[in-house]
Each structure stands twice: as structure tokens, then as C-alpha cells.
Image: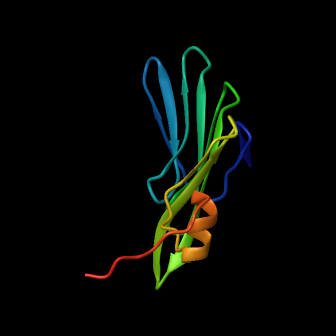
Amino acid sequence: MKFKGIELKGTYEFRCDTTSFEVYDEKGNRIYHENSNGYWYKWEYDKKGNEIYIENSEGYWEKSYFENSNGYWERSYFENSNGKIIDNRVKELTIEEIEELLGYKIKIKGE
């Protein structure tokens, strides 16, 4: 069954009040919110419950990517409909790569 463009499989909870309603999946994740003005948000989650996608009625969306590091899941970077990519990953660079980025040679001091 589809509801507001969301494929529904399983059991869902609908919460309503006088100005809005929300839909939650079996794990308690909010997957849809709409207010009385017709403004809405949709969320998607991976199997571990991490938010991986959000979209709203104004056309804005954001994707979250995760990387597995020794069995732990960590949010690494985001991409959104405005073309912005936010990358919080730690980058490992060689001295040569750092020099290329800086545009000049560097020397590492010892203690």
C-alpha cells in the first residue's frame, strides 16, 4: 500500500492533532509529517535505524551516507538539493598531497 508516495509494509502508527499528523514505522521512526497548511516532510532510514534521507514539500532533500569502520556506523557526509556536500570524515593525506594542496614544500619538525 502507498501513502503519500511512501510504500507502507508492516504496522504503522498515525498520530493526529488539530493542525498536523505524523506517521511512525514499527521501530518508532517518524517517516511522515504534514501540517494543516499542506507542508510535509518525509524520512527514510537504513536497517540500523540511521536517518538516510529527508525530503520536504518545497523540494528540499538531503541524503546521509554512512561508512562502516570496525563494526561501528558513523555519519560521514551529507548531500542536499542545494548542491552542498558536507564532509566530516577525517582525511589521511601524504606529505606530497599536503604540499600539492598548499602549493609549496613543507618540512615536518621533530620534537
Residue at image location 60% in from the left, 28% down from the top: 40
Image coords of residue 102 (percent x, y): 57, 58
Image coords of residue 43 (percent x, y): 58, 46
Q: Is 76 situated above or below 28?
A: below
Q: Quadrant of residue 60?
A: top right
**Closer to the camera in the image, 96 or 78:** 96
Can the viewer see residue 46?
Answer: no
Residue at image location 25% in from the left, 81% down from the top: 111
Q: What color scheme is it?
A: rainbow
**Closer to the camera in the image, 107 or 16:** 107
Left or right of residue 37, residue 1 in this image? right
Left or right of residue 30, residue 55 in this image? right
Q: Is 58 situated above or below 50?
A: above
**Closer to the camera in the image, 82 or 18:** 82
Image coords of residue 29 (percent x, y): 47, 52
Q: From this viewpoint, which residue is outermost toward the top?
A: 37
Residue at image location 68% in from the left, 34% down from the top: 82
Can the viewer see residue 73?
Answer: yes
Image coords of residue 24 (percent x, y): 50, 47
Q: Is 19 situated above or below 75?
A: above
Q: Is 33 situated above or below 45?
A: above
